[in-house]
Image: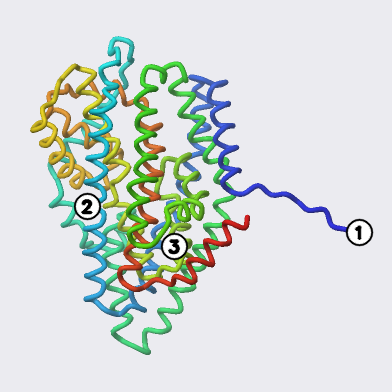
Amino acid sequence: MKKLKVYRLSLGWQIIIGLLLGIGLGVVFTENKKFIAFANGLGSTFINMISMIVLPIVFASLVVGIANMGDIKKLGRIGLKTLIYFEVLSTIAFITGMLVSNFAKLGYMLDLSKLSQVDISTYVKTAKQASHSGLGSILMSIVPSNFFDALATGQMLPVIFFSCLFGLGIAAIGEKGKILLQFFQAVAEVMFKITGWIMHFAPFGVAGLIGATVAQLGLESLRPLGLFILMSYITMIFFILVVLGITSRLFGFRIMDQLRVVKDELVLAFTTASSEVTLPRLMEKTQKLGVDQAISSFVIPTGYTFNLDGSAIYQSLAAIFLAQAYHIDLSFSQQLTLLLVLMITSKGMAGVPGASFVVLLATISTIGVPVSGLALIAGIDRLVDMGRTVVNVAGNVTATLIIGKSEKEFDQAKHDRYVATFYKK
């Protein structure tokens, strides 16, 4: 007797089903506080499960990768290349958003009297605190006074800094460090295995997160700002396919190959609006794409602080959109000033919760838009955040491949074999 084939849905399809189910339940239970509390709890549990393993994976993988590299000069060169790459791409993203917003002129079509305001007092408080600390404070916080405290509180940059030093230390003691190297390699493999188990819960977490969002906002309240959401998504798709596409081709890659390989992670990033949930799998997949472990373990976690492509698009689109809504005509010099202020402020807000929205709060006053105007688009922030998270994730993959190839730490044959497996499915 022939065994019956059991058809299993891929993770991507499971998450999409979870998304649709969540939207349906959100519509049915609109403004139902019990459902919103339950759905939020379900979503938060999934996010917490991923957050639980992210830093252990980063620490273990980075220690192993840097120990195998064993060259502080090379590490410094990789770090500098990574920061320059992210700075150049985020600047292009800012300019892209501003050009699209100027061309579309959708803000002039908005009737402000039909929009309901959302409480943004928490963001205002955060913006004031973050603006006082600025970029200097971010740079100073890279060196942890207590590594275990940084690990416990989820501070990515201090963990990366300590991991690099620890890995270099293992390399420096030679044979004696091999036992530590084997230990951390085993830790990384265990964490990746746990990641696979947690991913089975992803569709339920996604259903909860999107269900709570729809139930809180209601689909009716989204209509007046539908054009802004549409403009944001079109711009983000353009950035991924054209800007990242051209950047990839310059280094001999194809953006469609990358998107096909990480499609499940992109769906997960979109539905959860969280880059963090994709970090373990992105590190694993970029290594399967031929990038050396040291490069992958360094570039991807660094990107979670310095890769601002999606956020840059949103901030520039929203700033000019709001100016148009208030019928404030910005001159070229004003827009150039806005670009510079956004570039500086976005670096100072890195790592701040709700960073994209906080950056807008800190900058729109420079072009005459009242802070209260942001309360009008606060309700759709999460929906746009879903799109900008996808841009950030795609950007991290492209950056890792490019840095790996530029350092000659890239296996083209391994890359081609792994990509081919996704075209056979």
Q: Earlier in the sequence, mark 3 or mark 2?
A: 2
Q: Secondary structure at mark 2?
A: helix
- Residue 118 in percent (x, y) is at 32, 21
Q: Label 2 amino acid?
A: Glu
Residue at 46%, 64% in the rendered image = 289
In the rendering, which numbered label is found on residue 87? Answer: 2
Q: Earlier in the sequence, mark 1 or mark 3?
A: 1
Q: Secondary structure at mark 1?
A: loop
- Residue 48 in percent (x, y) is at 45, 47
Query: Between 415 and 86, which is closer to the camera in this rendering?
Result: 415
Query: Between 60 and 274, which is closer to the camera in this rendering?
Result: 274
Relative to 277, does residue 84 appear above or below in the rendering? Answer: below
Relative to 214, does residue 424 appear above or below in the rendering? Answer: below
- Residue 400 in percent (x, y) is at 36, 61
Q: Is 85 positioned to the left or the right of 289 in the image? A: left
Residue at 57%, 20% in the rendered image = 28
In the rendering, which numbered label is found on residue 286? Answer: 3
Q: Which residue is mark 1?
A: 1
For marks 3 and 2, give the CA distance.
21 Å
Q: Farthest residue toward the right?
A: 1
Q: Label 1 amino acid?
A: Met
For marks 1 and 3, give the CA distance.
41 Å
Q: Farthest residue toward the bottom?
A: 175
- Residue 43 in percent (x, y) is at 49, 39
Q: Earlier in the sequence, mark 1 or mark 2?
A: 1
